[in-house]
Image (cartoon, rainbow, N blue to C red):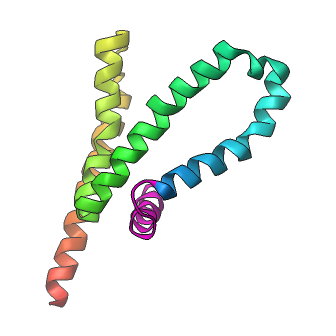
């Protein structure tokens, strides 16, 4: 699914100027998930503090990171971007350790290392195949 995300994000970035595609995708996702929120929370969704907190969470957890990723995809080759994306779990684990005092189990650390290694291996294998065809 990461590969599909990278490919579709790159296409969206090329097809729509600036962050228009991202804005459309976010609006579509919000409309799609709204009925589930209404069923679960009802009119509590209309409390001003809930709306404000929801906007802050949306900006910090989705809009800002996805905008930065979209900009990076326009400037970086897909293989480089894929490796950088595979570092996200390690960055999140480091933030969890520093900010929340969360510790990684050996299994968690191994899983993160395997994801990064697999991404690097896939990119290197793809580069070798491309070089062999030339």
Q: Position of residue 62 (x, y in %)?
A: 48, 38
Q: Nearer the viewer, residue 121 or 47?
A: 47
Left or right of 73: which side holds 11? right
Q: Which quarter of the figure has residue 34?
A: top right
- Seen at 23% across and 60% down, the residue is 75
Q: Is residue 10 a member of the stretch shown in magenta?
A: yes
Residue 62 lies, with reference to residue 95, above or below; the image says below
Magenta residues: mostly which secondary structure? helix
Q: Is residue 132 a member of the stretch shown in magenta?
A: no
Q: Which quarter of the figure has residue 123?
A: bottom left
Q: Nearer the viewer, residue 26 or 95?
A: 26
Q: Which quarter of the figure has residue 97?
A: top left
Which residue is farthest top?
101
Q: Position of residue 82 (x, y in %)?
A: 30, 56
Residue 106 lies, with reference to residue 129, above or below; the image says above
Left or right of 42: which side holds 130? left
- Give the extent of the magenta segment: 1-19
Q: Position of residue 33 (x, y in %)?
A: 72, 41
Q: Position of residue 131 (x, y in %)?
A: 14, 81
Q: Is residue 82 visible?
A: no
Q: Is residue 96 visible?
A: yes
């Amino acid at each position: 699914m990461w590969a599909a995300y990278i490919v579709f994000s790159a296409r969206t970035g090329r097809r729509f100027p600036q962050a228009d595609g991202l804005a459309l995708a976010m609006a579509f996702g919000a409309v799609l998930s709204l009925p589930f929120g209404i069923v679960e929370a009802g009119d509590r969704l209309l409390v001003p503090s809930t709306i404000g907190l929801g906007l802050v969470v949306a900006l910090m957890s989705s809009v800002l990171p996805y905008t930065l990723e979209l900009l990076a995809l326009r400037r970086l080759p897909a293989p480089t971007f894929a490796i950088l994306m595979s570092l996200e779990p390690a960055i999140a684990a480091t933030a969890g350790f520093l900010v929340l005092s969360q510790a990684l189990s050996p299994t968690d650390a191994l899983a993160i290392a395997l994801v990064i290694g697999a991404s690097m291996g896939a990119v290197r294998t793809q580069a070798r195949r491309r070089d062999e065809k030339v």
